[in-house]
Image (cartoon, coloured by chain):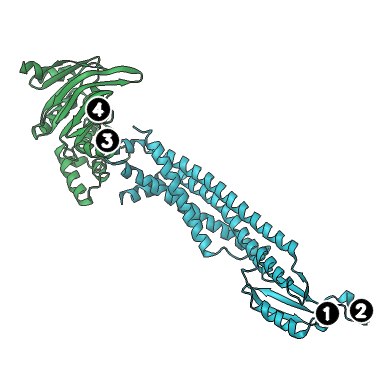
Amino acid sequence: MYALREAASAFRRAPVLTGLSAAMIALSLFVIGLFGLAAHNVREAIQNVESRVEVVAYLHDDAVPAAVQSAQQDIEAFEEVSAVRYISREEALAIARRELDELGNIFGTLDTNPLPASLEISLHPGQSGPEVIRLVASKVAGMPVVEEVQYGADWIDKIFVLRRVAGVATATLGIGFAAVAALIIGAAIRMAVFARRDEILIMRLVGATDAFIRRPFVLEGMMTGLIGAVLAVAATWGVFRLLSDSVVQLTWIPGTWLMFGLAAGVAVGLLASMIAVRRHLSEIV
Amino acid sequence: MIKLHDVTKDYARNAGALKNVTFELHKGEFCFLTGHSGAGKSTILKLIHMAERPTSGEVRVSGYSSTNITNRDVALLRRKIGYVFQDFRLLQDRTAAENIAFALEVTGARATVIRHKVGRLLAHVGLAAKAEKLPSELSGGEQQRVAIARALAHDPLVLLADEPTGNLDERATQGIFEMFRSINAAGTAILFATHNLELVRANPGIRLVELAHGEIIHDSLLERVS
């Protein structure tokens, strides 16, 4: 109770200093929040693209329908596969005429149909990583009725590299800014310790334990971290609304990420103040 | 109750702050500690308070030894020792009552206990009417009374006083000294460091330990015994 009251009174006694610390933590976490917002939306976009990833198996012209049907059933039985659709040669030509309008007259004048029949294989969401796609493609390619398999290997690799880079960049910047925030909290606690030097001396004089003396400072650090985190969430929300209303429709950061952000603010405040108070209390004798 | 056995204390810049000092303070005793500035008076008080540890020798206070006391035990020991300074060391942004309550709050006392005890202590030092005054609104003598009340908050076995009348005029000095006498009469031992020789001479019945250059050069108790 004493510790809580003293920690709260630090905000009243030195509002500029504690406000500045909270603002700096807010700024640091705000940058992390912006990256989080960006990372989340990139992830959403990638998942959207991924859900459309398909493996297409072109079939030999002379493939027997019974063999094709059997292959289709085999592929449908793969655990990674959500659906397999058979596209006959005629259907392929009709699709080509419809979708490739500018080439429509070429397809229209052909005597024979040059397009092969195919199996369009859709994968379960979350089963569309490059390794999984390659595995499915190689299993399908080994089937006798299949002549060739296509799945856009290059751009799938690129998307996954992009995703990994985005993840690493967010983590690196996040840790970097969290470290800066921790240093700022440490400096604020150091100033708070020295501002209350007389009080600490009296506490020691009358027999307060070190743990008791530390408690208000540690609580102050945690409260500063929490206030900073809440401000950062508010600022990130502001940017999200602004961009969504005027530039591009974004989706808001998931609740678990927000909880993690708030917990991170408190944790940074707790750690920084614990280290700072332990170090600086020993300087007051 | 308090025993310094062959204690030597060297500071980095002041070798020989205390040299082979052996000294005992018994329960309920009143003792003057005199000597020039730098003679070692404050060092003895700090050693008893365990704010300093001896370079060699041993300090024993109420069952605790300087050779193996932990930080937590230092805190617990200090609840049995009151300490009063020349410069009062009151928190300037707290009232007289809050300064006394602070000593109880930070050792985990309950609010009702604090309220009751603070009222009693303020009455004991004659400042019940000035409970809500800030230190800056009190005279030197009154501030020292608040400091004494704070030192008594934990009902200590001993009161260490480091030049407690150093900043006071003659009248206030007399008043504060009388207060120490009455506290002693109630059973609390007092170790009273001072270079106010007039005060010492005016009280010949009180034990006198004199220090010079870190050594005890005179102890009236030993003289009496011999």
Question: Can you see residue A14?
Answer: no
Secondary structure, mark 4, is helix
> In what quadrant of the picture does the C terminus of chain B appear?
top left
Tag 4: amino acid? Leu
Q: Residues within 10 Å of mark 4 (few under 14, many from 20)?
A: many
Chain in green? B
Q: CA distance from mark 1 to mark 3?
A: 95 Å
Q: Residues within 10 Å of mark 2 (few under 14, many from 20)?
A: few
Q: Is residue A97 left or right of residue B116?
A: right
Q: Residue at x 56, y 51 (%)?
A: A174
Q: Identify the chain of the residue marked 2, using the numbered disc in the image.
A: A
* Residue B132 drawn above or below residue A251: above
Q: What's the colour of chain A in the image?
A: cyan
Q: CA distance from mark 2 to mark 1?
A: 24 Å
Residue A61 got which mark?
1
Discs 2 and 3 share one subunit: yes
Residue matched to label 3:
A205
Q: Residue at x 21, y 39 (%)?
A: B79
Tag 1: amino acid? Asp
Secondary structure, mark 2, is helix
Residue that protrudes farthest toward the bottom in the picture: A66
Residue that protrudes farthest toward the left in the picture: B225
